[in-house]
Image: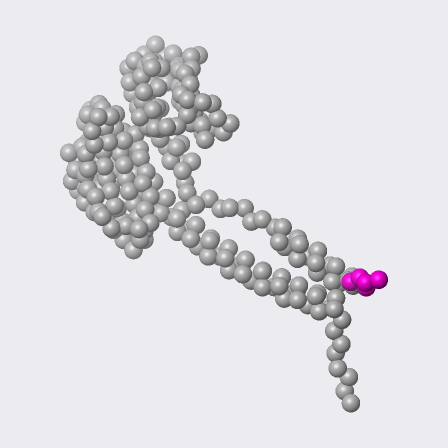
């Protein structure tokens, strides 16, 4: 019959510590500020739309596609909305309330899906 | 006669494991420190480029248009944020310091694009785009910044 290995308590502790150390995963740090850039571009879109006298979802969609080529998103103008591409699980959204000539407020929001 | 040390197999293994752990720890710490320094450098480049683009579209500096080319509302006596005066932007000159230099300023319209200036050099660069109005036409202002 072959003899088995016998580990002492401290060797077992060391093995456990080594395994724990190898299992530790350090979260990846952010290397870019792409989220901030998307947020800034959304705000650019909202500011430009706020300056326009008339707004239509069709034109807004065109503007979105120009600002965010190959990105999916959603635009809301008051109670109406339009989707651009597929809906994603995560999104970066911005909203603005535009006060019209008759002091009526219209909410405009834009979301970019990740 | 002096007594010597006797290492059993498990004590030997435990010693090797401790040495291996220390090695991994030192190597991981140094790798982390290196990554952190690199990340900080990248983040600084992103910040510089983003803030620079923001400065151009929100400020107006007639003597140095690279620090602000926003259009002016003469009646209200204020700058029009996100509206660029192309003639002023065209006067933009290079800007460079030890940590950052400007590689590119381009205005992209829906049907054409106009390069204000472009430098070939630059290894580690970031390009950001902002949406602006130029003579009532929507355009993307592309700013490229580099740190190497």
Q: Position of residue A58 (x, y in %)?
A: 33, 15
Whether B11 is drawn above or below B143: the answer is below
**Tell me, what colour scheme is on the image?**
one colour
Q: Position of residue B19 (x, y in %)?
A: 63, 66
Farthest residue to the front: give it: A1
Q: Position of residue B121 (x, y in %)?
A: 24, 50
Q: Which residue is located at x 38 percent, y 35 percent?
A: A37
Q: Which residue is located at x 41 percent, y 25 percent?
A: A72
| Quarter occupied by the N terminus of chain A | bottom right
| Quarter occupied by the C terminus of chain A | top left
Q: Which residue is located at x 35 percent, y 47 percent?
A: B45
- Determine the image quadrant of residue B69: top left
Judging depth in this view, the residue of B90 and A1 nearest the camera is: A1
- Determine the image quadrant of residue B21: bottom right
Q: Is residue B100 left or right of residue B28?
A: left
Q: Is residue B35 left or right of residue B82?
A: right
Is residue B13 something that shows in the picture? yes
Judging depth in this view, the residue of A17 and A105 nearest the camera is: A17
Q: Is residue B59 left or right of residue A9?
A: left
Q: Position of residue A81 (x, y in %)?
A: 42, 15
Whether A49 is drawn above or below B120: the answer is above
- Determine the image quadrant of residue B57: top left
- Magenta residue check for B120: no
Is residue B134 something that shows in the picture? no
- Magenta residues? A1-5
Farthest residue to the top: give it: A102
Q: Is residue B99 left or right of residue B29?
A: left
Q: Predominant secondary structure in magenta?
A: loop
């Amino acid at each position: 019959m072959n003899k088995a290995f016998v580990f002492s308590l401290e060797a077992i502790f060391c093995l456990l510590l080594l395994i724990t150390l190898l299992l530790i995963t350090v979260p990846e740090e952010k290397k870019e500020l792409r989220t901030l850039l998307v947020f800034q571009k959304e705000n650019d879109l909202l500011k430009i739309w706020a300056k326009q006298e008339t707004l239509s979802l069709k034109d807004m969609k065109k503007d979105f596609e120009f600002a965010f080529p190959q990105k999916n998103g959603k635009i809301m103008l008051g109670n109406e909305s339009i989707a651009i591409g597929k809906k994603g699980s995560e999104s970066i959204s911005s909203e603005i309330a535009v006060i019209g000539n008759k002091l009526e407020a219209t909410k405009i929001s834009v979301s970019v899906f990740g | 006669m002096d007594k010597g040390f006797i290492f059993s197999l498990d004590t030997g293994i435990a010693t090797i494991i401790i040495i291996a752990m220390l090695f991994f720890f030192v190597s991981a710490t140094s790798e982390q420190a290196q990554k952190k320094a690199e990340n900080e450098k990248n983040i600084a480049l992103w910040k510089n480029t983003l803030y620079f683009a923001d400065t151009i579209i929100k400020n107006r500096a007639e003597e140095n248009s690279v620090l602000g080319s926003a259009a002016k509302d003469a009646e209200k006596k204020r700058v029009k944020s996100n509206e660029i005066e192309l003639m002023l932007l065209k006067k933009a000159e290079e800007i460079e310091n030890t940590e950052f230099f400007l590689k590119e300023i381009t205005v992209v319209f829906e049907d054409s694009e106009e390069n204000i200036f472009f430098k070939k050099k630059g290894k580690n660069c970031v390009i950001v785009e902002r949406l602006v109005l130029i003579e009532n036409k929507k355009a993307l202002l592309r700013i490229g910044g580099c740190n190497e």
